[in-house]
Image (cartoon, grey):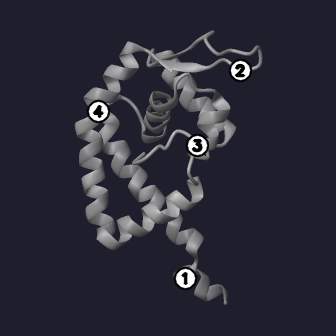
Amino acid sequence: MIAEMASTCMFIRTRLIARTITGIYDKKLRPFKIGSTPFAVLVVIYQIEPATRAEIGRILHLDPSTLTRSLKEMLCAGWAEETKEGADGRSRPIVLTSAGRDLLHKAVPAWQSAQDQVKVLLGKDGVIATMDVANRIMKPTAIGIVGI
């Protein structure tokens, strides 16, 4: 049974796929000095701002330490900022700055190039299957994020 694990384990296979796809996006976004995870966080903030850390973490299924690292990078780079708008004393909502919005707009061609490369890698059936599984995991949300 253990010998079979190497060739049939879904965990090993999905980690390989995830790391390969992440690498594609990271490479394409490198000229903008942002990684794929902080970029995805920026996209989510853009969609729902002002965004709380809890909302971002829930949408992207990020653990608190990964989210904290990404937010720290974004806040230090001036791409996002904490706002008092919507603050309730326990949370500090986050909004994009004009620099963050500019970064998103400038990075669209790089993101599209990564999308195209990943679609070729996965093939039509792989793209459909991936989107189907991701949509089931995400479940419909009030914000209706599509295509992150």
Could you give the CA–CA distance between mark 3 and mark 2, rounded to whole angstroms?
17 Å
Q: Earlier in the sequence, mark 3 or mark 2?
A: 3
Res 8 label: 1
Res 34 label: none
- Please state which of the two labelled residues, at mark 1 or mark 3, is closer to the viewer: 3
Q: Earlier in the sequence, mark 1 or mark 3?
A: 1
State which quadrant residue 39 falls in.
top left
- Please state which of the two labelled residues, at mark 4 or mark 1, is closer to the viewer: 4
- Please state which of the two labelled residues, at mark 2 or mark 4, is closer to the viewer: 2
Q: Nearer the viewer, residue 120 or 12?
A: 120
Could you give the CA–CA distance between mark 4 and mark 1, rounded to whole angstroms?
37 Å
Could you give the CA–CA distance between mark 2 and mark 4, rounded to whole angstroms?
29 Å
| Residue in the image at 61% along x and 11% along y | 85
| Residue in the image at 55% along x and 22% along y | 50
Q: Is residue 146 above or below residue 20?
A: above
Q: Is residue 66 visible from the viewing direction of this image?
A: no
Check if mark 4's residue and mark 3's residue have beta carbons within 8 Å: no
Residue denoted by label 4: 107
Residue denoted by label 2: 91
- Amino acid at the residue labelled 4: Ala
Q: Is residue 97 visible from the viewing direction of this image?
A: yes
Callout 2: SS:
loop
- Residue 15 in picture, x, y percent from top left: 52, 63
User: Dot 4, crowdedness within 10 Å: few (<14), some or many (≥20)?
Assistant: some
Residue denoted by label 3: 59
Callout 3: SS:
helix
Q: Nearer the viewer, residue 98 or 29?
A: 98
Which quarter of the rendering shows the C terminus? top left
Could you give the CA–CA distance between mark 1 and mark 2, rounded to whole angstroms?
43 Å
- Amino acid at the residue labelled 2: Ser
